Image (cartoon, coloured by chain):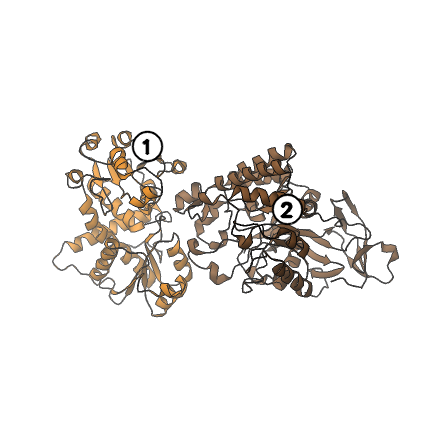
Chain colours: A brown, B orange
Amino acid sequence: MSDNSEILLVGGRVIDPFCKMDMVMDIGIANGVITEPGKLKKPKKIKLHGKVIAPGFIDMHVHLREPGNTAAETIRSGTMAAAAGGFTSIVAMPNTMPPADTPGTVEYVRRHAESEGVVRVFPCGCMSKGLEGKEMAALGSLKRAGVVALSDDGRCIQNHELMRHVVEYAASFGLPILDHCEDESFKANGVMHEGKWSVLLGMAGQAAASEELIVARDIILSRQTGGKIHIQHISSLASIEQVRQARAQGINITAEATPHHLALTDECVKRFDANHKMNPPLRSEEDRQSIIAGLADGTITVIATDHAPHTTTSKLVEFDYAPFGVVGLETAVPVCLHHLYHTGVLSLSELIAKFTVGPAEILGFEDRALAIGNPADLTVLDIDDEFTVDATTFKSLSRNTPFDGMSFRGRAVATIVAGRIVHSLLPGSAR
Amino acid sequence: MGDIAWHRKDLLSIYDLESEEISLILDTAEEFKKVSERNVKKVPALRGKTVVNFFVEPSTRTRMSFELAEHRLSADIVNIAADSSSLRKGETLLDTVRNIEALQIDLIVIRHSAPGAPMLIAKNISCGVLNAGDGAHAHPTQALLDLFTIREKKGRLRGLKVTIIGDILHSRVARSNIWGLLKLGAEVTLAGPSTLVPRDFEKIGVRVCHDLRSAIEDADVVNLLRIQHERQRAGFFPSVNEYARFFGLNETTEKYLKPDALVMHPGPINRGVELASTVADGPRSVILEQVTNGLAVRMAVLFLVAGCMNK
């Protein structure tokens, strides 16, 4: 994946939360790694005055749909979407068809990512066989096949004893658990957040309590076993409060928030557009505010997209019958710059950390700083570029975004993976 | 019939309507009610128009009422029921209605179990769409006939106290009534078991009450909803008997009502559960008049929507 050409990034503001750096400086790239500018021979110069250079963004929650549903996304299109959104590394969720519960499927994803992918793809393995929540998958073998984490995302292991064993066993292989928290006995076929808007619209609600109960369970199991549990797409006020308290007690719990949960609320569902249907659902304004507060005070250390492609055909149906999920790779950075940085909730460095330091710490990535000798994975931002989202231009094969037609301020204008420019909106760049 | 200030190709929910639009429908329905009282019960208002009654969820009363309204307006009618529809063969709802649209249909009357299905259709095709009930979301013509009946009997809606009792959580009738009543200035109380009457309704200015007596004693109108046995099985209340005991209107609880209170029910009635026969068939009951008025109201909305499409 690395490139032999030399690049010199000139005049950009380098913000690297790994080493708490924020200064204007040049960065050299040679042989796919970060190199001292003085050691380059004849580099291609790229002027980045007024732009921000950050360590490559990581999205630790992506559904690439391959194998199984290549009409919605492929490893090729999903990684192109990631590059277009400013991500250099993504974690591929295992709920493919077949699911990544065996080394063979993990191997398939890795091999295709190497040959077709334009960003780094890190497979995540299943916790339970077939995502059925009944028997533990071969976690050790999955680790050997290259998974960086374990998850039954989309499903949630309901049997607490099995979950405890998974957490204990995974810890011995150094694998973090990424948990989709949902008590399924609470579900009642809910299609949106249970609250004022589900009541007014007459839609079946998904109670926030179903998430909160499993978050409580996970905190208890993490405290008991010492295992590392990461709460995926945290969405409710009470869940976040539990994580805040658990972290204060030193329990090994982390959490991620999605751009859609921090930007939108359940009121959006009143248009009955299934591009507002996802799991967990868009929740109340109070919940949305608590996500923002959790990001601000460090309770939530990661922003992840839960990029969930679905074909237009499958989404253009009755809201009740549409599948859950929205795409997010190509809108995450704009939405977050808009809602978190330009509103003054987070500093630029803090926001960048949610896309870099946060996930790297959980996944055990140790070479992500913009330091000499590290892989040249970089994300270049234009924090003031105003534009309107046009889903028809997405690199993703799917268009199921709730942000289509909305305007944002700021986006990723270039993405560099191992010294190779995989996305660029910079003047003079080939599109 | 005066100047038509109607500009919608669809009637999807009461929530969307301005109070003037609701009043226009009720005024128009008054005129159409006279038609049904004549010897010749047919007018040529929709002659040459084709209406498809597309019932993806079974219905007897609403469908018959719409069909009769269409006949009396001289429309051509096609009926599609869920069983015979190609939806069973895996075709999407939109493909089905696009096929209907391709046959140069003017109006689609849709009943569907999924909330928002009529909105999905209306957004994607050019035919007029009338919502005949979508899941627990909306049932605008039922609310309109209820409003019509109250206005006819009481002379007004503003300031009236209207209590709706029953399974509010799962009721499209309740939701559409609530919006219509609030928009026309009535005061709304919702009553029933706390599991079926969510407190969230208070956020839109409705009173929520779990005691039958205080819910009905100063009511001008009591609208009872059908209680479905499947809710008991889903654990919302312990038994139909207990429901009847605490929330049923019967000889005993009827005594709490004002003498001139109206008793309404969208049908079909569970006699002896939410409503005792003596009350259902008693002097306060306007249940059969609701059915009669439903025809006039549906003629009115078909007429208004079709008229808009001519422009």
- Percent of width and height locating residue A245: 60, 33
Figure quadrant of residue B253: top left
Q: Which residue is mark 2?
A: A170
The residues tagged by marks 2 and 1 sit, at their Cα atoms, a distance apart of 50 Å
Q: In the figure, is residue A5 to the left or right of A264?
A: right
What SS does tag 1 mark?
A: loop
Q: Nearer the viewer, residue A174 or B267?
A: A174
Q: Amino acid at mark 1?
A: His
Same chain for labels 2 and 1? Say yes or no. no
In the rendered image, the quadrant that contains the N terminus of chain A is bottom right
- Percent of width and height locating residue B290: 21, 47
Q: Relative to residue A392, is residue A255 depicted above or below?
A: above
Q: In the figure, is residue B286 to the left or right of B158?
A: left
Q: Which residue is depicted at the point 51% across and 52% down?
A: A132
Q: Chain of mark 1?
A: B
Q: Nearer the viewer, residue B74 or A70?
A: A70
Work out whether residue A230 can be spotted: no
Q: Relative to residue A105, is residue B209 depicted above or below?
A: above
Query: Which disc number belongs to residue B210?
Result: 1
Q: Dot 2, crowdedness within 10 Å: few (<14), some or many (≥20)? A: many
Q: Nearer the viewer, residue B30 or B120?
A: B120
- Percent of width and height locating residue B174: 32, 43
- Percent of width and height locating residue B63: 25, 57
What SS does tag 2 mark?
A: helix
